[in-house]
Amino acid sequence: MQAQLAEEGDVVPLSTLCRWLGVPRRTVYYEPRVRRSTVDAEKAARVKAVIERFPTYGYRRVAVVLGWNHKVVQRIFQRRGWQIRKRAKGHRPRVKALPSVAARINQRWSTDLAMVWCGRDRWCHVALVMDCANREALGWRLSKRGNAATAEAALEEALIQRFGHLGRVPGPLQLRSDNGLVFTSARYTATVRAYGLQQEFITPYSTEQNGMVERFIRSLKEECVWQHRFESISHAREVIGQWIRHYNTERPHQALGYKVPAQLAA
């Protein structure tokens, strides 16, 4: 406007124009500075290497792996467009009864079954047993049949892993599961009693009451099963076994203060 008036022969000071228009002078003189968004190429390369190895990790878990401040990694994620899409948040009803947690090691274990596509062996079943206190995967078994024998094998592997031998557990230990035919079968319930565990079942159609092992199964699928194309059940066993070892000894857990289950084992 000042330039337009000058072309018409009227020289009006900028302060006068601001007074006429009711605009503070500082808003006219101020020129915002645009900060250049720079990213350290070496740091970005190290972050990218972790993402390529663990494509489901968010910036906080990547920061733990690298031993960096999470804000540094978050900034690299954002500026390179590597931000993982967040799940939509909404109301999720939670039951208050039978929480799937434990205050100490060997207070409550949780078990479940999941299906895995194994190429020429088609759909197979993996049975899992984990400790609800430190989220350690104690025992697992991948089989062509999701029956009581498969679930028993996973339980016995968990007993050997935790206590070093098969036999009655030294103290009260609860084993939580859903109400499926495998876990309610006479064979499986007899095995559980023989080893001295106290079997407990969730409320029907309330899988959130077995949330620990359900969350483990989701991580197994997202970080392992869906990242590979298994050719056979033997191939699946090899890869899943490697991932479970990584899960127990290397993978940081947010719920554990970004520690690994092995650090909190008895």
Image (tube, helix red, strand yellow):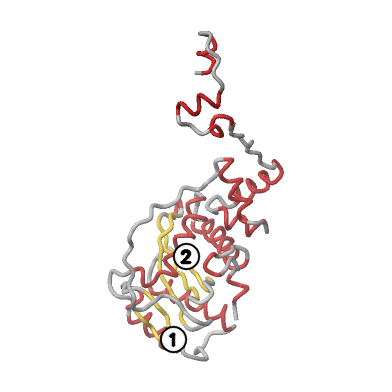
Amino acid under disc 1 = Leu
- SS of the residue under disc 1: loop
Which x, y percent locates residue 193?
40, 88
Q: Which mark is residue 216?
A: 2
Q: Is residue 243 above or below residue 196?
A: above
Residue 52, placed above or below residue 208: above
Count residues near mark 2 (Cα–Cα under 10 Å), then give few for <14, some for 14-19, many for 20+: some
In the image, residue 62 lies at what x, y percent? 60, 55
Work out which residue is located at the far right of the displayed protein and give it: 42
Q: Splitting the image into 4 quarters, where does residue 145 fall?
A: bottom left
Residue 225: mark: none
Question: Which element type, helix, strand or loop, lies under badge 2?
Answer: helix
Residue 203 versus residue 115 in the image, above or below = below
In the rendered image, which residue does mark 1 sit on?
Answer: 197
Is 29 on the left or on the right of 96, as rendered?
Answer: right
Task: Kindly identify the residue that appears in the image at 46 percent across and 81 percent down.
Answer: 108
